[in-house]
Image (tube, grey):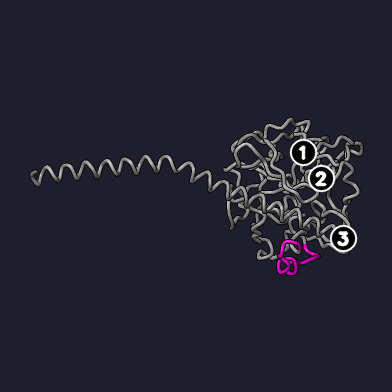
Amino acid sequence: MSTSRTRAFTLVELLVVIAIIGVLVALLLPAIQAAREAARRSQCINNLKQIGLAIQNYHGTRNELPPSRLPCHHATWAALLWPYLEQDNIAQRWLPNKSFYKQPLENLDVQVPSYLCPSRRSAPQLSLEGDFRQGGGSQTHRPGGLADYAVAIGDGEGYTGDGGEETAPEDSTPNGPFRVGKAGKCYGFDPDVYFEGDYTSQTNFKSIEDGLSNTLFVGEKHLVPQGFGKKQFDDNSIYNPDFHRTISRYGGPKAPLANAQDETIPPFSNFGSWHAGIVNFSVGDASVRSINNSIDPLVLRLLVVRNDGNSVSFGDL
Protein backbone atom coordinates (compact mmCIF):
# COMPACT_ATOMS: atom_id res chain seq x y z
CA MET A 1 0.00 0.00 0.00
CA SER A 2 1.40 3.38 -0.98
CA THR A 3 2.15 6.11 1.48
CA SER A 4 -0.53 8.37 -0.03
CA ARG A 5 -3.22 5.68 0.39
CA THR A 6 -2.10 5.11 3.98
CA ARG A 7 -2.42 8.82 4.67
CA ALA A 8 -5.90 8.85 3.12
CA PHE A 9 -7.07 6.01 5.36
CA THR A 10 -5.57 7.73 8.40
CA LEU A 11 -7.45 10.94 7.58
CA VAL A 12 -10.73 9.06 7.16
CA GLU A 13 -10.23 7.29 10.47
CA LEU A 14 -9.49 10.60 12.16
CA LEU A 15 -12.64 12.15 10.75
CA VAL A 16 -14.68 9.17 11.93
CA VAL A 17 -13.24 9.52 15.44
CA ILE A 18 -14.00 13.25 15.47
CA ALA A 19 -17.55 12.56 14.30
CA ILE A 20 -18.03 9.96 17.04
CA ILE A 21 -16.71 12.37 19.67
CA GLY A 22 -19.09 15.04 18.39
CA VAL A 23 -22.05 12.69 18.68
CA LEU A 24 -21.03 11.66 22.19
CA VAL A 25 -20.66 15.29 23.28
CA ALA A 26 -24.09 16.11 21.82
CA LEU A 27 -25.57 13.20 23.74
CA LEU A 28 -23.79 14.00 26.99
CA LEU A 29 -24.26 17.80 27.01
CA PRO A 30 -27.94 17.75 28.05
CA ALA A 31 -27.09 15.29 30.82
CA ILE A 32 -24.26 17.55 32.02
CA GLN A 33 -26.53 20.60 31.94
CA ALA A 34 -29.23 18.69 33.80
CA ALA A 35 -26.72 17.62 36.46
CA ARG A 36 -25.56 21.21 36.89
CA GLU A 37 -29.12 22.47 37.24
CA ALA A 38 -29.87 19.71 39.75
CA ALA A 39 -26.92 20.94 41.81
CA ARG A 40 -28.09 24.56 41.54
CA ARG A 41 -31.62 23.59 42.49
CA SER A 42 -30.29 21.67 45.49
CA GLN A 43 -28.37 24.77 46.59
CA CYS A 44 -31.51 26.89 46.19
CA ILE A 45 -33.42 24.45 48.41
CA ASN A 46 -30.63 24.63 50.97
CA ASN A 47 -30.81 28.46 50.90
CA LEU A 48 -34.49 28.33 51.76
CA LYS A 49 -33.79 25.78 54.45
CA GLN A 50 -31.27 28.15 56.04
CA ILE A 51 -33.71 31.06 55.83
CA GLY A 52 -36.44 28.90 57.38
CA LEU A 53 -34.17 27.91 60.26
CA ALA A 54 -33.15 31.55 60.74
CA ILE A 55 -36.83 32.48 61.10
CA GLN A 56 -37.26 29.68 63.65
CA ASN A 57 -34.31 30.98 65.66
CA TYR A 58 -35.54 34.56 65.38
CA HIS A 59 -38.91 33.48 66.75
CA GLY A 60 -37.20 31.51 69.51
CA THR A 61 -35.37 34.67 70.57
CA ARG A 62 -38.20 37.22 70.29
CA ASN A 63 -41.33 35.06 70.35
CA GLU A 64 -42.51 36.71 67.13
CA LEU A 65 -41.92 36.49 63.39
CA PRO A 66 -39.67 39.08 61.78
CA PRO A 67 -41.74 41.93 60.31
CA SER A 68 -41.73 42.12 56.54
CA ARG A 69 -40.30 45.61 57.04
CA LEU A 70 -40.01 48.36 59.62
CA PRO A 71 -41.31 51.95 59.54
CA CYS A 72 -39.03 54.99 59.37
CA HIS A 73 -37.54 53.61 56.12
CA HIS A 74 -35.37 51.53 58.38
CA ALA A 75 -34.91 47.84 57.53
CA THR A 76 -36.51 44.65 56.20
CA TRP A 77 -36.81 41.00 57.16
CA ALA A 78 -33.63 40.31 55.16
CA ALA A 79 -31.66 42.63 57.46
CA LEU A 80 -33.34 41.41 60.64
CA LEU A 81 -32.25 37.83 59.89
CA TRP A 82 -28.53 38.66 59.57
CA PRO A 83 -27.61 37.49 63.11
CA TYR A 84 -29.32 34.15 62.47
CA LEU A 85 -27.50 33.52 59.19
CA GLU A 86 -23.99 33.85 60.62
CA GLN A 87 -23.80 37.48 59.53
CA ASP A 88 -23.37 39.08 62.98
CA ASN A 89 -20.60 41.38 61.74
CA ILE A 90 -23.02 42.89 59.23
CA ALA A 91 -25.77 43.28 61.81
CA GLN A 92 -23.41 45.00 64.23
CA ARG A 93 -22.25 47.62 61.75
CA TRP A 94 -25.82 48.57 60.71
CA LEU A 95 -26.66 51.93 62.31
CA PRO A 96 -29.78 51.10 64.36
CA ASN A 97 -31.29 54.59 64.37
CA LYS A 98 -30.61 55.49 60.73
CA SER A 99 -32.89 54.95 57.74
CA PHE A 100 -31.83 52.95 54.68
CA TYR A 101 -31.10 56.22 52.88
CA LYS A 102 -28.66 57.42 55.54
CA GLN A 103 -26.71 54.19 56.03
CA PRO A 104 -23.12 54.20 54.75
CA LEU A 105 -22.90 52.49 51.38
CA GLU A 106 -20.77 49.71 52.85
CA ASN A 107 -23.78 48.85 55.04
CA LEU A 108 -26.00 48.46 51.98
CA ASP A 109 -23.91 46.42 49.54
CA VAL A 110 -24.06 43.30 51.71
CA GLN A 111 -23.90 40.02 49.82
CA VAL A 112 -25.55 37.14 51.71
CA PRO A 113 -24.98 33.86 49.81
CA SER A 114 -28.23 32.37 51.11
CA TYR A 115 -30.26 35.15 49.48
CA LEU A 116 -29.37 34.31 45.87
CA CYS A 117 -30.52 31.31 43.83
CA PRO A 118 -27.63 30.01 41.66
CA SER A 119 -30.04 28.98 38.90
CA ARG A 120 -30.73 32.68 38.39
CA ARG A 121 -27.60 34.61 39.44
CA SER A 122 -24.70 34.74 41.87
CA ALA A 123 -22.98 37.41 43.95
CA PRO A 124 -22.14 40.21 43.72
CA GLN A 125 -25.54 41.70 42.89
CA LEU A 126 -26.41 45.36 43.57
CA SER A 127 -29.44 47.43 42.66
CA LEU A 128 -29.01 49.58 39.56
CA GLU A 129 -31.76 52.13 40.14
CA GLY A 130 -34.73 53.01 42.29
CA ASP A 131 -33.20 53.09 45.77
CA PHE A 132 -33.75 56.74 46.52
CA ARG A 133 -36.46 58.49 48.48
CA GLN A 134 -38.74 60.25 46.00
CA GLY A 135 -40.10 63.55 47.28
CA GLY A 136 -38.03 63.35 50.42
CA GLY A 137 -35.02 65.40 49.42
CA SER A 138 -32.71 62.49 48.62
CA GLN A 139 -32.49 61.85 44.89
CA THR A 140 -29.21 59.91 44.90
CA HIS A 141 -29.49 56.20 44.22
CA ARG A 142 -28.19 54.07 47.09
CA PRO A 143 -27.14 50.72 45.60
CA GLY A 144 -27.91 47.80 47.88
CA GLY A 145 -27.73 44.03 47.88
CA LEU A 146 -30.37 41.99 46.04
CA ALA A 147 -32.20 38.74 46.82
CA ASP A 148 -34.10 36.05 44.95
CA TYR A 149 -36.47 35.29 47.84
CA ALA A 150 -39.43 37.11 49.35
CA VAL A 151 -41.74 36.64 52.34
CA ALA A 152 -45.42 35.82 51.89
CA ILE A 153 -47.77 38.60 53.03
CA GLY A 154 -51.06 37.17 51.81
CA ASP A 155 -53.34 36.93 48.80
CA GLY A 156 -53.08 40.59 47.74
CA GLU A 157 -56.77 41.36 48.23
CA GLY A 158 -57.21 45.05 48.97
CA TYR A 159 -53.56 46.10 49.38
CA THR A 160 -51.75 45.97 46.07
CA GLY A 161 -50.44 49.55 45.99
CA ASP A 162 -46.91 50.69 46.84
CA GLY A 163 -48.06 51.35 50.39
CA GLY A 164 -48.73 47.67 50.82
CA GLU A 165 -49.74 46.21 54.13
CA GLU A 166 -50.18 49.36 56.18
CA THR A 167 -52.47 51.04 53.63
CA ALA A 168 -54.93 48.15 53.47
CA PRO A 169 -58.59 49.01 54.09
CA GLU A 170 -59.76 48.27 57.61
CA ASP A 171 -61.83 45.34 56.38
CA SER A 172 -58.97 43.85 54.37
CA THR A 173 -55.86 43.46 56.52
CA PRO A 174 -52.92 41.39 55.25
CA ASN A 175 -53.60 37.73 55.83
CA GLY A 176 -50.19 36.17 55.26
CA PRO A 177 -47.55 35.20 57.84
CA PHE A 178 -45.61 38.47 57.52
CA ARG A 179 -46.72 42.05 58.10
CA VAL A 180 -45.13 45.44 58.57
CA GLY A 181 -43.72 45.93 62.06
CA LYS A 182 -44.68 48.45 64.69
CA ALA A 183 -41.80 50.67 65.72
CA GLY A 184 -41.03 52.92 68.65
CA LYS A 185 -40.85 56.50 67.39
CA CYS A 186 -39.63 58.23 64.26
CA TYR A 187 -37.98 61.64 64.45
CA GLY A 188 -36.66 64.06 61.86
CA PHE A 189 -37.52 64.82 58.28
CA ASP A 190 -37.87 62.43 55.38
CA PRO A 191 -35.57 60.77 54.38
CA ASP A 192 -33.31 61.64 57.32
CA VAL A 193 -35.62 59.94 59.79
CA TYR A 194 -34.32 58.62 63.08
CA PHE A 195 -35.68 55.40 64.55
CA GLU A 196 -35.89 55.26 68.34
CA GLY A 197 -36.88 52.34 70.52
CA ASP A 198 -37.55 48.70 69.77
CA TYR A 199 -39.99 47.23 67.28
CA THR A 200 -42.66 44.56 67.50
CA SER A 201 -44.15 42.22 64.96
CA GLN A 202 -47.84 41.76 64.25
CA THR A 203 -47.55 37.98 63.80
CA ASN A 204 -46.07 35.01 65.61
CA PHE A 205 -46.41 31.23 65.44
CA LYS A 206 -49.71 31.33 67.34
CA SER A 207 -51.21 33.58 64.68
CA ILE A 208 -50.55 30.93 62.01
CA GLU A 209 -53.91 29.34 62.70
CA ASP A 210 -53.79 26.99 59.69
CA GLY A 211 -50.63 25.37 61.05
CA LEU A 212 -46.94 25.99 60.45
CA SER A 213 -46.56 22.87 58.31
CA ASN A 214 -49.40 24.04 56.02
CA THR A 215 -48.36 27.67 55.47
CA LEU A 216 -45.84 29.10 53.02
CA PHE A 217 -43.41 31.56 54.59
CA VAL A 218 -40.68 32.40 52.05
CA GLY A 219 -40.43 31.62 48.36
CA GLU A 220 -38.58 32.37 45.17
CA LYS A 221 -39.82 35.63 43.74
CA HIS A 222 -40.64 36.08 40.08
CA LEU A 223 -38.04 38.15 38.23
CA VAL A 224 -37.50 38.74 34.53
CA PRO A 225 -33.92 38.89 33.16
CA GLN A 226 -34.16 42.52 32.03
CA GLY A 227 -35.38 43.56 35.47
CA PHE A 228 -32.36 42.63 37.58
CA GLY A 229 -31.63 45.38 40.08
CA LYS A 230 -34.46 47.66 38.93
CA LYS A 231 -37.27 48.99 41.08
CA GLN A 232 -39.77 49.08 38.19
CA PHE A 233 -39.44 45.29 38.07
CA ASP A 234 -39.60 44.96 41.87
CA ASP A 235 -35.94 44.03 42.24
CA ASN A 236 -34.26 46.95 43.96
CA SER A 237 -32.39 46.39 47.22
CA ILE A 238 -33.79 43.72 49.54
CA TYR A 239 -32.79 45.96 52.48
CA ASN A 240 -34.90 48.92 51.33
CA PRO A 241 -38.25 48.81 53.16
CA ASP A 242 -40.07 51.33 51.00
CA PHE A 243 -41.30 49.00 48.25
CA HIS A 244 -43.20 46.04 49.61
CA ARG A 245 -43.31 44.15 46.30
CA THR A 246 -39.51 43.95 46.29
CA ILE A 247 -39.28 42.23 49.65
CA SER A 248 -42.59 40.33 49.69
CA ARG A 249 -44.98 38.53 47.37
CA TYR A 250 -48.63 37.51 47.14
CA GLY A 251 -50.16 34.16 46.31
CA GLY A 252 -53.65 33.48 44.99
CA PRO A 253 -55.97 34.35 42.09
CA LYS A 254 -54.50 37.85 41.91
CA ALA A 255 -50.96 36.47 41.93
CA PRO A 256 -50.62 32.91 40.55
CA LEU A 257 -47.19 31.36 40.29
CA ALA A 258 -45.31 32.61 37.23
CA ASN A 259 -45.12 30.00 34.47
CA ALA A 260 -41.91 31.21 32.84
CA GLN A 261 -38.87 33.24 33.82
CA ASP A 262 -39.57 35.83 31.12
CA GLU A 263 -43.27 36.26 31.86
CA THR A 264 -43.77 40.03 31.81
CA ILE A 265 -47.31 40.62 33.03
CA PRO A 266 -47.06 43.41 35.64
CA PRO A 267 -47.18 43.96 38.50
CA PHE A 268 -44.35 41.60 39.33
CA SER A 269 -45.80 40.60 42.67
CA ASN A 270 -45.86 36.86 42.01
CA PHE A 271 -43.71 34.06 43.26
CA GLY A 272 -41.76 32.32 40.50
CA SER A 273 -38.46 30.61 39.75
CA TRP A 274 -35.93 29.78 37.06
CA HIS A 275 -36.32 26.04 37.69
CA ALA A 276 -38.29 24.00 35.20
CA GLY A 277 -41.89 23.59 36.32
CA ILE A 278 -41.52 24.25 40.05
CA VAL A 279 -41.09 27.02 42.62
CA ASN A 280 -39.32 26.36 45.93
CA PHE A 281 -40.76 27.54 49.24
CA SER A 282 -39.74 27.50 52.87
CA VAL A 283 -42.70 26.44 55.01
CA GLY A 284 -43.49 27.59 58.55
CA ASP A 285 -41.95 24.48 60.11
CA ALA A 286 -38.67 25.21 58.22
CA SER A 287 -39.21 22.39 55.74
CA VAL A 288 -38.80 23.17 52.03
CA ARG A 289 -41.39 22.28 49.38
CA SER A 290 -41.20 22.38 45.61
CA ILE A 291 -44.61 23.38 44.22
CA ASN A 292 -45.66 22.89 40.62
CA ASN A 293 -46.07 26.28 38.98
CA SER A 294 -49.38 25.14 37.47
CA ILE A 295 -50.97 24.86 40.93
CA ASP A 296 -54.54 26.14 41.12
CA PRO A 297 -54.30 29.77 42.36
CA LEU A 298 -57.16 29.07 44.78
CA VAL A 299 -55.12 26.29 46.37
CA LEU A 300 -52.05 28.57 46.41
CA ARG A 301 -54.12 31.11 48.30
CA LEU A 302 -54.95 28.52 50.97
CA LEU A 303 -51.23 27.86 51.42
CA VAL A 304 -50.33 31.54 51.75
CA VAL A 305 -53.17 32.79 53.97
CA ARG A 306 -52.39 32.04 57.60
CA ASN A 307 -55.88 32.01 59.11
CA ASP A 308 -58.63 31.13 56.65
CA GLY A 309 -59.53 27.89 58.43
CA ASN A 310 -59.00 25.85 55.27
CA SER A 311 -55.54 24.38 55.64
CA VAL A 312 -54.16 22.27 52.81
CA SER A 313 -51.73 19.41 53.38
CA PHE A 314 -48.87 19.16 50.93
CA GLY A 315 -49.61 15.46 50.72
CA ASP A 316 -52.91 16.36 49.03
CA LEU A 317 -51.29 18.39 46.24
Q: Secondary structure at mark 3?
A: helix
x and y percentages locating residue 93 in the rendered image:
73, 69
Q: Earlier in the sequence, mark 1 or mark 3?
A: 3
User: Which residue position is annotated with label 1?
Assistant: 314
Give me the residue at 83% from left, 35% from top: 158
x and y percentages locating residue 64 in the rendered image:
87, 55
User: Which residue position is annotated with label 2?
Assistant: 213
Q: Nearer the viewer, residue 162 or 282?
A: 282
Q: Earlier in the sequence, mark 2 or mark 1?
A: 2
Mark 2–mark 1 contact, CB under 8 Å?
yes
x and y percentages locating residue 243 in the rendered image:
74, 47
| Residue reaching furthest to the left | 2
Give me the residue at 70% from left, 51% from top: 48
Residue type beneath disc 2: Ser
* Position of residue 205 in the picture relative to residue 118 (left or right): right
Q: Earlier in the sequence, mark 3 or mark 2?
A: 3
Q: Is the residue 184 above or below the residue 208 in the image? A: below
* Residue span colored magenta: 84-98
Label 1: few (<14), some or many (≥20) within 10 Å? few
User: Which residue position is annotated with label 3?
Assistant: 62
Q: Is residue 212 magenta?
A: no
Quadrant location of the N terminus?
top left
Numbered disc in front, either 1 or 3: 1
- Marks 3 and 2 sit apart, C-alpha to C-alpha, by 20 Å
